[in-house]
Each structure stands twice: as C-alpha cells, then as structure tokens.
C-alpha cells in the first residue's frame, strides 16, 4: 500500500473553537432546484437561444442541446462514480486533487473561484439592466444598473447567510414560475402548429453543420453551467451516496429536455427562415414577441418580470455554490481557517458567504468605475471568462476520474471508470477547443481582450499551484491506494 496526498474533505475540527460542518436534509429534488435555478432556464431561452440561432447553425440550433446533454451525461457517469468514494463538498477541485494531485487540485479550485465569480458578476450586470428596463418601460425613472445590482446583492447576502433550505424554498418558487411561463408559450405554439408547421430542421445532420455549429455549441453549453454543483451540496444532502448521482442525472436530463423542446418550439413559432431573421434583428425581444404573438400581451409582461426573477434565482444559486467552495477551501487550509466556519444556528457557511458577497460587490464597483455596459460588456465578457473556465475544469475532472480509478481500483466497472469518462473527455476537449478558438467572438470580437481573459484563467490555475507549494499542509490528507 502507498499513500498519496490529495485534497482534503472538510474537517469537523476547529482551530478557533467554532463549528466547521454544514448540515441539511436536501433530497434530489431540492438539489435539482438549486442546479436548474443556476442554469436560469428563462434567461437561456430569452438570451442564449436567439444568439445560438442567429450566430450559430440557425433553425437546427435545438439539436445542439441534445449533443451537449449527451456529452455531459457521459461526463456525469464518471463524476458520480467517483463521488461515491470522495468525501467533502469541493466538487471539481476535490476530484482533480484525488486524481491528479494536490497542486492540480488547488489550481482547479482557484480556477473554479474565478469562473463562478465571473458568471455571477455577469448575472449582476444583466439583472441590473433588466430591472431598469422594466421600470422605465412602465413610466418609472431611469436608475443606474449598479444601484439595482447592489440592492439585489443585499438580498442575496441575507439569504446566503441563512440555512440552505431557505434558499432552496425561494429557488423552488421562482423556478416553477419561470419554467411555467415558458411551458405556457410552448404549449400555445404547439397548439397553433407554429408559423409554418413544426420545424424539422434539427433532425437533419446537414442542417446541424450549416453555418457555425461551433458557436452554437458554445451558446448551448453556457446553459448548463452549474449542473456539477450537485456535489457541492454533499454535506447538506440526505444520503449523499444516492442523492448526488440521482440529482446530477435528473438535472442534466431536465435541463437538456427543456432547452431542446423550448428552442425547437421557438423556431417553429416563426418558421425556419423567420426564426433566423427574428433572432438576428431582435434577439433580446424574441421570447417576449413570441409570448405576445401566441399567448397575449399579458404573457409578454410576465416574461419581462420573470426574466428578472430568473436572473435572481441564478445569482442566488451561484452565491451558494461559491460560498461552499470557499468554505471547503477554508477547512482545507488553502484559505484562512475562518472561511471554513459554519453558523451555530443556521449551519450555513456564513463567513464564506460574507467573503463571497464582498467579492461580488468588488466586481460590481469595478465594472461601474470602468464604465462598462452592463449587458454588452459586463454580461458578455464575464460570461466568456466563465464558459472557458468551466469547460476546462470539466475536462480536467474527466482526466482525474480515469486516473483515479486506474490507480486505486476502487471501482473496476469498465463503463463507469473508463469508457464513459473517456468518451466524455473527448467531447469536452472538443468543446474546450471550440470555446477557446471562438473566445474573441464571446467578448465582442476583441483579440486583445480574449488574450487577457486567457491569461487570467491560466494565472488563476497557477496561483492555486503556488498556494500548494507555499502551504504544504493545505488541502492535504492521505488515502490508501493499491500499488
């Protein structure tokens, strides 16, 4: 037998007398609500779908969700198999550390922090602009986006400080509302038979490869960001060995089916050529125009309101994920020990939540001082950072899964440990290349900005490795593995 240093699970020991363990009774449904809320279904249908149709592969765009779901399901096979053997709630970084070593694990941890902070900053920009648009559309005064964003930040901070089940209940209500309005639109389009009959473009491989399928896949993949957060809630899950795998598969299937169905009916609502024209000329208003055309003006107003609640649900979910990353790193010694404390009454990562709130406030203030547009710059640029970072993390995790099981032999099932993770790795590596190559497009066509973003992502990963060298006991414990 040999010992290998890996990322540690959260410790229950306290260096300062405070409790460090989280607790909860979340089942698969509660965790799925968290994950799907982070995916922001209405935001994806209103934002990513029109962009994917116009800049990607046109009327065949719905098929990209099927492709992405298939790749991520393959990834999930190895991910959930490894989750049964890995304690702790560090998600990506924990798995990378167990498979590829402590230095790579902490590199992944810091890359994850940057990626999720970026996507949260993107959502804060979008929600500030969306609230202002709604208020001014109904005769209210124009208010700078950052005022609304900071107001939302205060609400998020309050919910994140408290027990996770409160956030779960809030997310559940908001999720039902946003999914409900999209399904009403879907059923109405289906009932009317669309503009020219129901589209069949997504069924043709030739149509799928028409235009820019690589761009289409990037926009589609962005809708899944956060699905792996099922493992982040391990410490607060009821029977995590069963809950986490079930929640992961359920979240992926529901997200993929919802996006594929809704985008297909969005295309059908306008016809193949008409959908491309609408998505090109009025991408931000496509979902609202579809609601008005097939349901009525009241539905159009509801879409505007629920878009804001969708964004709120997303930013709350990302806050919870980030707080748990910070909490896990605090317990591992990679960050100050105080970050790993949990609240005596709420059993929440309250210190980590405060740290995360502070970092979000810094992002909002920095974007404001930089004079960035909340949508075309804050949202687009920060989402671009996150897209590359998350795909890179999933690719690393796929490699870690294969290496871990080959080394430990804790699970010798061929499909779960070699074939599915290997196929998922090929798919993710392809998506990573496509995302990196098209990064300038994601950030407004600027090669310089794309290079800066790439440098930031690499620097984040390297900073984690530096911490591993500077703090030899950070994120370290030993496990027994077979020679």
Image (cartoon, rainbow, N blue to C red):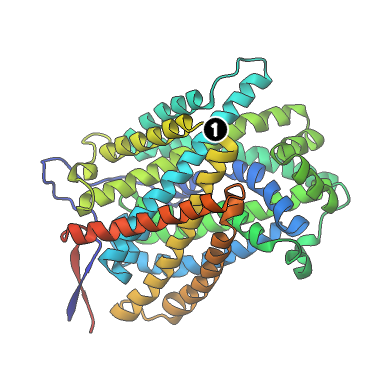
Image location (x, y in percent) of residue 153: 42, 30
- Residue 347 in sight from this viewpoint: no
Q: Quadrant of residue 380?
A: top right
Q: Choose between 216 and 64: the one closer to the eye.
A: 216
Image location (x, y in percent) of residue 398: 43, 69
In this rendering, position of residue 200 left or right of residue 237: right
Q: Quadrant of residue 338?
A: top left
The crowd level at tag 1 (other Cα within 10 Å; few <14, some 14-19, many 20+) is: many
Q: Residue furthest right?
A: 196
Q: Secondary structure at mark 1?
A: helix
Above-or-below relation of 287 to 97: above
Q: Choose between 343 and 314: the one closer to the eye.
A: 314
Q: Quadrant of residue 409?
A: bottom left
Q: Residue furthest front?
A: 448
Say how many tags the image has: 1
Give the residue pinned by disc 1: 127
Q: Choose between 105 and 460: the one closer to the eye.
A: 460
Above-or-below relation of 347 to 158: below
Above-or-below relation of 205 to 345: below
In this rendering, position of residue 157 left or right of residue 278: left
Quarter holding the N terminus is: bottom left
- Residue 209 in sight from this viewpoint: yes
Quarter holding the C terminus is: bottom left
Name the residue at 48% across, 67% down.
Answer: 75
Q: Residue furthest bottom?
A: 483
Name the residue at 66% across, 37% down.
Answer: 181
Image location (x, y in percent) of residue 74: 51, 69
Image location (x, y in percent) of residue 256: 60, 56
């Amino acid at each position: 037998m040999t010992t290998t240093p890996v990322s540690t699970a959260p410790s229950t020991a306290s260096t300062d007398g405070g409790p460090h363990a989280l607790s909860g009774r979340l089942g698969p449904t509660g965790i799925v609500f968290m994950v799907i809320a982070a995916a922001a279904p209405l935001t994806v249908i209103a934002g990513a779908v029109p962009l994917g149709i116009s800049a990607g592969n046109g009327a065949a765009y719905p098929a990209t969700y099927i492709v992405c779901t298939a790749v991520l399901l393959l990834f999930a096979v190895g991910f959930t198999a490894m989750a049964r053997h890995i304690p702790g709630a560090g998600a990506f970084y924990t798995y990378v550390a167990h498979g590829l070593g402590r230095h790579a694990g902490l590199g992944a941890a810091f890359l994850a922090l940057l990626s999720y902070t970026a996507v949260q900053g993107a959502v804060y920009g979008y929600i500030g602009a969306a609230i202002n648009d709604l208020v001014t559309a109904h005769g209210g005064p124009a208010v700078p986006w950052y005022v609304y964003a900071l107001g939302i930040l205060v609400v998020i901070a309050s919910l994140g400080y408290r027990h996770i089940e409160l956030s779960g209940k809030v997310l559940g209500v908001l999720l039902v509302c946003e999914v409900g309005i999209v399904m009403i639109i879907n059923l109405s389009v289906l009932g009317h038979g669309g503009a020219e009959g129901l589209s069949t473009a997504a069924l043709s491989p030739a149509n799928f490869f028409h235009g820019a399928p690589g761009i289409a896949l990037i926009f589609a993949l962005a809708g899944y960001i956060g699905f792996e957060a099922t493992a982040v809630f391990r410490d607060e899950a009821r029977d995590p060995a069963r809950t986490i795998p079930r929640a992961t598969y359920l979240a992926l299937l529901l997200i993929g089916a919802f996006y594929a169905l809704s985008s297909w009916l969005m295309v059908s609502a306008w016809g193949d050529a008409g959908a491309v024209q609408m998505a090109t000329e009025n991408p931000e208003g496509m979902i609202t125009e579809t609601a008005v055309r097939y349901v009525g003006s009241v539905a159009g107003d509801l879409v505007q309101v629920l878009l804001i609640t969708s964004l709120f649900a997303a930013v709350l979910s990302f806050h919870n994920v980030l707080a748990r990353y910070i909490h896990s790193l605090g317990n591992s010694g990679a960050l100050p020990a105080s970050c790993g404390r949990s609240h005596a009454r709420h059993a929440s990562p309250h210190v980590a939540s405060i740290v995360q709130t502070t970092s979000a406030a810094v992002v909002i203030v920095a974007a404001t001082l930089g004079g960035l547009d909340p949508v075309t710059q804050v949202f687009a640029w920060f989402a671009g950072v996150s897209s590359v970072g998350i795909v890179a993390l999933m690719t690393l995790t796929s490699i870690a899964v294969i290496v871990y099981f080959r080394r430990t032999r804790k699970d010798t099932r061929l499909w779960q440990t070699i074939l599915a993770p290997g196929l998922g790795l090929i798919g993710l590596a392809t998506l990573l290349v496509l995302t990196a190559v098209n990064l300038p497009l994601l950030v407004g066509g600027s090669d310089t900005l794309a290079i800066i973003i790439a440098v930031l992502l690499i620097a984040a990963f390297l900073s984690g490795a530096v911490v591993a060298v500077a703090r030899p006991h950070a994120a370290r414990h030993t496990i027994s593995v077979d020679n």
